[in-house]
Amino acid sequence: MITNVAPLLQFVGASKTFEAVVAVAPLDLSVAPGDTLVLIGPSGCGKTTVLRMALGLLWPDAGQVRFRGELLSPANVQRARRSMGYVVQEGGLFPHLTAEQNVSLMARHLRWPRARIEQRQAELAALTRFPINALGRYPFQLSGGQRQRVGLMRALMLDPDVLLFDEPLGSIDPVVRSELQQDLVRVFKQTAKAVVLVTHDLSEAAIFSLDHGRVALMRQGRVLQQGRMEELVRSPADPFITKFVAAQPLLAFGHAPEPRSK
């Protein structure tokens, strides 16, 4: 975590309710350049709702979401989204577009010159270890890991300030998932983006938060505890945290593999 740097994304007492069901209780979280914040917790605890509020896909019923110090609102949300990259399971690719067309979608919308698009795609293919000769393939012609890399490239295309990940590796087989985890950690370090990542997997949270990252464990819309992973494991602030940790083998805690140098 980088200290003494103004937050890029802030939740200030932000809450959301759906038909009298509290999805997110008043929430105070922030992420600055170079920060990695991992939201973890059981299904339905509010993790994805937090991301959707960050993107302006949902608006808080109370409190604020601020981006670059400015209140996020319908008037500025489109501009803010161009500085946010969003990655979901399988990359969330459009099936009728090739990998190249998926990656360059927003750049083409913004009328970037073709040469600039091609240069940026080549940079991102190298960064994400995606075979550049596969850019002409459609999503059904790619492996799950390749689709996820395309989704990451698309999120990075406009060089956003913040990357938001919603269970990005949840449907990928364990071997490829391990490779992608290490590659994502490397990308986070190289790009120094602010990252908010949602997962329900404790070992994955440990890997992504290992290098000065934070973990926020949620339950029923509330953050029970946030801080370093070892703090949650060794000094749980709530009995549910103890139960949640005990329910998953924390394979990566304390000895997560270092990202491979490429």
Image (cartoon, rainbow, N blue to C red):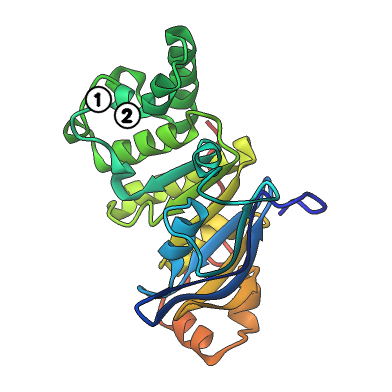
Please report contact status of discs 1 and 2: CB closer than 8 Å, yes or no: yes
| Residue depicted at x 52% and y 44% | 77
The residue nearer to you, when weighing 256 against 21, is 21
- Residue 142 disc label: none
Disc 1, SS: loop
**Residue where numbered disc 1 is placed:** 98
| Residue depicted at x 44% and y 16% | 111
The residue nearer to you, when weighing 6 against 227, is 6
Which residue of the protein is positioned furthest toward the bottom in this rendering? 239
How far across and how far down the image is residue 133, in percent? Answer: 30, 17
Amino acid bearing label 2:
Asn
How far across and how far down the image is residue 174, in percent? Answer: 32, 55
How far across and how far down the image is residue 217, in percent? Answer: 53, 74
Is residue 126 positioned above or below 209 on the image?
above
| Residue depicted at x 30% and y 38% | 147
**Residue where numbered disc 2 is placed:** 102
Is residue 211 positioned above or below 227 on the image?
above
Q: Is residue 97 left or right of residue 183?
A: left
User: What is the quadrant of residue 186 in the picture?
Assistant: top right
| Residue depicted at x 26% and y 42% | 144
Q: Is residue 4 left or right of residue 246?
A: right
User: What is the quadrant of residue 247 in the picture?
Assistant: bottom left
Is residue 170 positioned above or below 121 on the image?
below
For label 1, count other residues whose C-alpha is less than 10 Å away and answer few (under 14), some (14-19) or many (20+). many
Amino acid bearing label 1:
Thr
